[in-house]
Image (cartoon, rainbow, N blue to C red):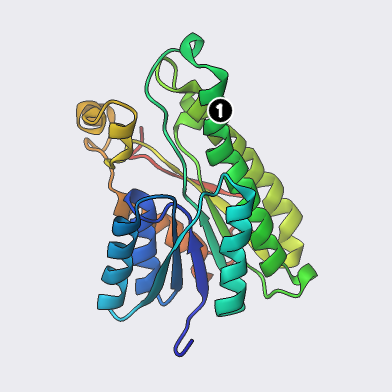
Amino acid sequence: MAGMGKVLLVTGGSRGIGAATALLAARDGWTVVINYRSASAAAEAVVAGIRARGGEAEALRGDIAREADVTAIYGHIRSRYGRLDGLVNNAGILPRMGRFEDIDPARWNETFAINVTGTFMCSREAVRMMSRRHGGEGGSIVNLSSMAAVYGAPNEFLDYAATKGAIESLTIGLARELGPEGIRVNAVRPGLIDTEIHGSAGDAGRAERLAATVPLGRSGTAEETAEAIVWLLSDAASYVTGTTITVSGGR
């Protein structure tokens, strides 16, 4: 691909933090593969925005909770680009708010399948492409955690919080395992960020309602979160691994 920069895969890149990350990474010269599960129009709009600014991007459908889909995503990246330099594990779901005893196993399993197992499978395939042990040139993985991992999200979504705790443990272990193979692994822990995800949990006004509880006096934006993610991907963070950066306005 003429003029292709380093190749980045952003899962769940059609909206919110994923879309903001794709746009900022493209600004910095990355060729961006934007994965989405169902929001094709939104994903293509992000691609169009990148190309309008002279960047390289494409949208690629796939459910990261399905191993066959993950295999197909990476097969496409191998055949089209022949390399992968970065992965942002952004795709995830936030279930509807409620108490712990009202969570059923189907909801629990679905939340873990997407938020944890999906991250595991995407990371595994990325390692197989990027690790020097497998003939790769190294790279960077950034996982999306949440302040819910710290607070536990009582009376809201304990299952979501538990998945993000798992992501932070995975980040530490992978960083230590993969450092000698040229792969840095970090996480970003967003706080109260004003994106569409609150609406999917049944509380669209949550970010505005809780803004006063943030020391900086407001909710954060997807772009502010993306700045931290793209920095971790970059050579400017070349000696940073196994770290979780909190982007929470002090909350």
At x 79%, y 68%, the residue is 133
Can the viewer see residue 140?
Answer: no
Q: Position of residue 247 (x, y in %)?
A: 39, 44
Q: Is residue 44 above or below residue 6?
A: above
Residue 148 left/right relative to 113? left
Can the viewer see residue 65?
Answer: yes
At x 27%, y 63%, the residue is 45
Nearest to the observer: residue 163 or residue 199? 199
Dot 1: what SS?
A: helix
The residue labelled by disc 1 is 162
At x 58%, y 37%, the residue is 113
Task: Name the residue at the right extreme.
Answer: 133
At x 62%, y 73%, the residue is 78
Nearest to the observer: residue 236 or residue 143? 143
Residue 130 left/right relative to 204? right
Q: Residues within 10 Å of mark 1 (few under 14, many from 20)?
A: many
Q: Position of residue 116 (x, y in %)?
A: 59, 39
Q: Is residue 12 above or below residue 32?
A: above
The image quadrant where one finds the C terminus is top left
Q: Amino acid at mark 1?
A: Ala
Residue 19 left/right relative to 178? left
